[in-house]
Amino acid sequence: MTIFKQERKPDISVIVPVVERYDDLRKVFVEYSEPFRKIGKGFEFIFVVDGGFNKAYEELKSLKNEFNEIKIIKFARNFFESIALMTGIEHARGDIIFTLSAYFQVEPNAINEIMVQLKKGYDLIITRRFPRRDNILNRIQASSFNLLVRKITACSFRDIASGLRGMKSEVAKSLELTGDMHRFIPILAYQKGYKVLEINAAQRAEDKKLRFYGLGTYTRRFIDIVTLFFLIKFTRKPLRFFGLIGINLFSVGAVITGYLAYVRLFMSQGIAGRPLLLLGLLLMVLGIQIASLGLLGELIIFTHARDIKEYHIGEIIE
């Protein structure tokens, strides 16, 4: 990993993960740095380059020779976007931290509105690409994904995957991103009690190409949503989740075995060779095991409760 250091502490850090695709990086830097130059804020652009993107890395090293605001972090192999963002946040020195895609999604002037809203007291500002200018299939995919997330989380965000975000450093440092959880940054921050706002940002013409992924990608995204649901609802109370499943399975198994016991005792019919008996016993055992997982989770959380902080204090008056 190579890190280029800059002496002056910047006011703003912009983290740009180069992990999947990227546009002209010079153009990305020049256009998105212009709003910060106009408002007179010191800034740094931290480009986190995933393994395998050697051409992008060489381009950025050339840019570094021209612009002192650029910092480069290069991974030895692929770690993908969540780790790239976490690494960028770890090395960010600004009081305000932006995240930005390495390709054009929204117009740079949205940065000005983000700064305005941060000054008003919001902790995290995300952008919604509106009006959408891209392929109809892209819009259907995005709308379906965001609708499902809204139903599960009860949050009203309409474009959580948009890459341009601005947040206070405190918010960014509190994030714990694993897997593909970077898509759910606004929801994770909202659950901690931070003030999150979504604003409209004009979509760039470059962001109109059809994006259609393989079945594995959609499967992983569905799993991510299920993971998010569990993290939001049951992280601090796993027994409610596993216990509910376990009790239901045990109850079904108990009803089956109770019925078979009645058949054997009062109707004098043999039950030893019935598959239904094995099913009933299996469900009862499985129910006990799953409920035990929840109980074990409760014990672990109770033991580490003092080390787990899932909240943000807005104000203390003494």
Image: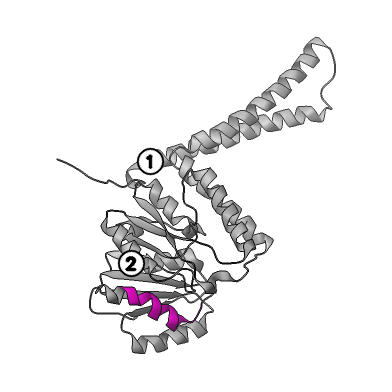
Q: What residue type is labelled 1?
A: Thr
Q: In this view, does 109 lie to the left or right of 119?
A: right
Q: Residue 144 carries which label?
A: none
Q: Do the residues labelled 1 and 2 touch (CB within 8 Å)?
A: no
Task: Determine the residue positioned at 38% across, 40% down.
Answer: 303
Q: Which mark is residue 112?
A: 2
**Secondary element at image label 1:** helix
Task: Determine the residue positioned at 42% across, 54% down.
Answer: 186
Q: Nearer the viewer, residue 99 or 138?
A: 138
Q: Answer with the quarter of the image where residue 317 lies.
A: top left
Q: Which of marks 1 and 2 is nearer the N terminus?
A: 2
Q: Position of residue 166 (x, y in %)?
A: 36, 62
| 10 Å crowding of disc 1: few (<14), some (14-19), many (20+) | few
Magenta residues (range): 23-35
Q: Which of 29 and 292 is in front in this view?
A: 29
Q: Where is residue 40 in the image (x, y as percent from the top left)?
A: 24, 74
Instruction: Look at the image and tell me whether residue 201 can be seen.
Output: yes
In three-dimensional space, the C-alpha distance between marks 1 and 2, rounded to whole angstroms, equals: 45 Å
Task: Determine the residue positioned at 37% across, 44% down.
Answer: 304
Q: Name the residue under label 1.
A: 303
Q: Where is residue 122 in the image (x, y as percent from the top left)?
A: 31, 54
